[in-house]
Image (cartoon, coloured by chain):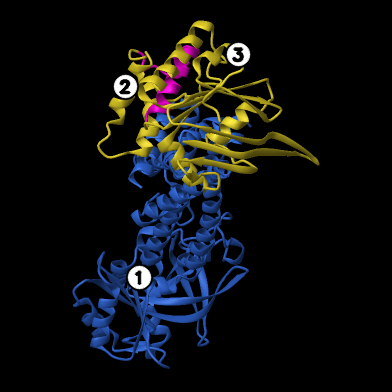
Amino acid sequence: MTRLLRVAAFLALKSIVKGNVGVIILTIFMLILVTMNLLFVPGLINGANASMNTILIKTYSGDIIIGPGGDKTVINHVDDLIAGIESIDGVVAASARNDINAYITFEDERVGRVITGIDPKREKAVFDVAESLIEGRYLDSRDRGQILLGVQLAGADLEDIELYSSSLRHVHAGDKVVVTYSNGLEKQYTVKGIFDTGFIQSDLQAFVTELEFNSVTPNMNNKASSVRVKIEDGTDPDRIIGRIASLRSGLDFQTWDETAGLVESMTESFVLINQILNVVNYLIAGITVFIVTYVDVINRRRQIGIQRAIGIKSHSITISYLIRALFYAIVGLIIGILAFKYVIIPIEARHPFEFPFGPAYLTTKPVYTVRMAFALLVVSLVAAFIPVWRVMRIKILDAIWG
Amino acid sequence: MLEVRNLSKIYGLGEVEVRALDGISFTVADGDMVCIMGKSGSGKSTLLRQLGLLDQPTLGEIILDNEVVTELSEDARAMLRLQYLGYVFQEYALLAELTAHENVYLPGMMLGEKGIDFKGRARDLLELVGLGRRINHYPKELSGGEQQRVAIARSLINNPRIIFADEPCANLDTISSKKVMETLVGLNRDMKVTIIFVSHDPDDKRYARGLIVLSDGKMIKEGSQIQ
């Protein structure tokens, strides 16, 4: 076996060193492109996912969502609960939210939405909505008769936003809107601010202060529909959930990713697109190696016949071609991965792809890179083996003299 | 000893059968030097390829040291070629990507016998055929005669019992031809290697102690060593 490999390595080395430099460079160049393409699409998807997940957590869900468990509709004694949660190591802040269905009317437009009562100070500690204002100002804890609207709800005369046609269209900060609550109460509000987080689900929200909310639904004092919790980076949410559950039983817990329905379906679509592109990329890699090897073995059929005639075993010759294919693939992979990491990623970081939810930065995951490299090596080996195997089946005399 | 019994090679061309070799039988003793002659198309090269185990006959047997080798698998025949037989092709058949030295030691590397310095032996063999100063030249940098002598050196790398040479001087000028034939004669004389060569030049008979003459695939016996 050692002899087989030694002769194979010798033949492979000689054919690379003395082979056609142009063909070798072109083959490796193709494999570099394939490698970068195999890294680019998942890198972009990972970047977009990370961007989406961040914005989802920071503007919509928080890291952990606590709901009333069982058939309850509210969490009681929420102030005590929040104090307990914020004392847990790894928790940054917690904010109680109360929801009520309502219709919001402005001029001829009428939109049904959930109005959420919040403590603005706590919300600022959990969410970044306050940093996404495009008009007006954020709510203050003592505000009454004021409402904060997402841009997809207000419209703000921005006709190019995704849900403009189903929004209030022309609402700006300072305008008066009428809110008709599901309990029958109707009240006029001044729009204090409009926010645009770039994430559609977040920008459909409408907020009033806890003080205002309690005036509309007086029986909700010290109660909440949900509590949103922000935890420190790198903290295990399950550990925090366990700690909170030990503070009070009967609560319902969700992590941010369990609420990401839209994001998840987008991710699934991206993953499917990625898989399709990967198959195409592996085919391109395989066909490139196949063609190069096929043309080579056809051109060198006589030489292969001579090698066999002087006693070089078919296995050695076959392995020599596999080593060449591995050489192409490994060089292509190394250059492709380095170019992606040290050229493409830094350039993209300076000029990131802009998505509706914000910039997406290319990223690479070592596990994916290793898996991709392994798959590309296997594809190259199989692609090289087929033409060599066919030539090895030809009789020696036919190989030498045709 | 090489023994050939009733050897036939039949090619099928559609419904037509072509008997390239027809019932050839002879014996070659160890250390002999035999010339196979005949007109073009008489079956000389076909016979040599059967003997060199590059092809399988349709009928008959080739017996090498009392062992029938015609029915062996491709791998086993490859091993026999590597260990016991050397083959010199009419068209030199060197590997273009390898130097003269590498061309010669490659089969030695494949056999890989322990304790054998095949690279040193390859150098010695190239010295033996008069190419000691050309060992690092590639085939395209050598003349036809030099390439053929490299091929002869290659055929010797694994100490073969028999060397088959298929019209080794067909593409060479007179001087180069003489050098190549004298090299083969020297090997036969000094190293006791059995040599069977094909030639269409009647003058080459003088180099051989035995002679096989073919005509239309059939053998005409000649020469004292041929029985």
Q: Which residue is mark 3?
A: B202
- The subunit carrying tag 3 is B
Identify the main secondary structure in magenta: helix
- Please report the residue visible at 45 percent of the width from the left and 55 percent of the height from the top: A45
For label 3, the SS is helix
Gap in angstroms between the C-alphas marked 3 and 1: 99 Å
Residue A132 position within the rendered picture, expressed as x and y whole percent measured from the top left: 39, 58
In the displayed structure, A355 sits above or below A384; it is below
Q: Which residues are magenta?
A: B134-157
Residue B103 makes an appearance in the image: no
Gap in angstroms between the C-alphas marked 2 and 1: 78 Å
Kindly check if marks 2 and 1 are in contact, taking CB atoms under 8 A apart as contact. no
Closer-to-camera residue (A184/A320): A320
For label 2, the SS is helix
Residue B103 position within the rendered picture, expressed as x and y whole percent measured from the top left: 41, 26
Chain colored blue: A
Furthest toward the bottom, the residue is A71
Q: Which residue is mark 1?
A: A62
Q: Earlier in the sequence, mark 3 or mark 2?
A: 2
Callout 2 crowding tier (Cα within 10 Å): few <14, some 14–19, many ≥20: many
Q: Quadrant of residue B126?
A: top left
Q: Which residue is mark 2?
A: B123
Chain colored yellow: B
Quarter of the picture holding the C terminus of chain A: top right
Residue A74 position within the rendered picture, expressed as x and y whole percent measured from the top left: 38, 88
In the displayed structure, A296 sits above or below A200; it is above
Kind of residue indicated by mark 1: Gly
